[in-house]
Amino acid sequence: MSAAALVSARGATVTFRGGLINRAPPVRAVTDVDLDIAAGEAVGLVGESGSGKSTLGRLLLGLLQPTAGHVSFEGRRLDSLSRREWRALRRRMQVIFQDPYGSLDPRRRIGAQIADGLAIHGLAAGSALKTEVARRLAAVGLDPSHAERYPHEFSGGQRQRIGIARALAPEPAFLVADEPVSSLDVSIQAQIMELLDRVRHERKLALLFISHDLPVVRRLADRVLITYLGRIVEAGPAAIVLGRPAHPYTRALVSATPRIAAGKRPSRIILPGDPPSPSAPPSGCAFRTRCAHAVDACAAVVPPMQKLGLDHVAACTRLSEIG
């Protein structure tokens, strides 16, 4: 684990059991993940639907237990914490959900929902609780008087701001934003990203930003992790990974990103077929069944990460050949 890391994973793997009735095979959603996230750092986690992004986010929050490997927070392994230690730690790890409509309780005023985190963790009580709720609403650009309203009285962008206020209420050190702008209009997306970027810098938050939208990730993240079928296949500074991608899968993702700016565009890379099922992954390199550069040797061994530059790594045995 890096000495500067706030959140770390080593060999982290999550396997879900198959169905008992139809005897379905187990599903490996996350496989052998190593990562570090430092305080104040924004890390983008990118991949297709079903690539294990949300599962990894929940694993880092301790909402899922790894079936192999471990996750650490501030140098302490989460699987070694007592119940009391977990309660003290929980306020320091929060999540913003994808759906701003489904993540709020429609029967409760939004002020009460934001107040929960403050009251449960003993950060405010009595008259001070109302003051703290008002302060947190103002911090995300909402009128403090809105605390008495219900979720249905707000737009999608406002509801996501409420979700951010609720997540930030206990003053966390680590925040997982799971596709927080995917259901919003483009103009609202920009406002929410600006808000997240501002609070991340102001509070020195470690942020894991989960998305399949490369322009959004490029705007917000310092560093990017590319996942395919539960494995990280490329990682490094956002400008390098998204500007000069090395792994064939990353190249395909970047080539599919719409661009407005003039200039030469990379040729679109069309990947054949669909991603394999995580319950029956290919041997060796999981991407080989869709990769134009695959050879027989790619089926023999899982490719290790290769260092390509400062903090830039990719998992492909043919990197030197495909240039």
Image (tube, rainbow, N blue to C red):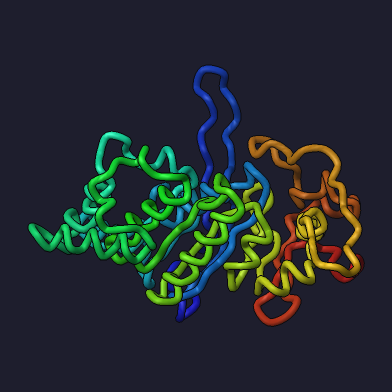
Query: Residue at the spot x=29%, y=62% of the render?
Result: 136
Query: Residue at the spot x=52%, y=56% of the render?
Result: 12
Furthest residue toward left: 126
Q: Is residue 111 left or right of residue 18?
A: left
Depth order, front residue of 153/97 = 153
Depth order, front residue of 5/96 = 96
Query: Residue at the spot x=46%, y=80% of the render?
Result: 4
Q: Splitting the image into 4 quarters, where does residue 189 fall?
A: bottom right
Q: How many marks?
A: 0
Question: What is the x, y in percent for residue 320?
Answer: 87, 71
Asked if 106 appears above or below 20 in the picture, the reply is: below
Q: Is residue 52 left or right of residue 287?
A: left
Question: What is the x, y in percent for residue 91?
Answer: 28, 60
Quarter of the picture holding the C terminus:
bottom right
Asked if 116 appears above or below 279 in the picture, the reply is: below
Asked if 123 appears above or below 154 in the picture, the reply is: below
Q: Splitting the image into 4 quarters, where does residue 221 fall?
A: bottom right
Q: Is residue 275 left or right of residue 174?
A: right
Question: What is the x, y in percent for residue 288?
Answer: 82, 49
Depth order, front residue of 27/63 = 63
Query: Residue at the spot x=76%, y=59% of the render?
Result: 250
Question: What is the x, y in percent for residue 110?
Answer: 28, 47
Q: Is residue 45 left or right of residue 48?
A: left
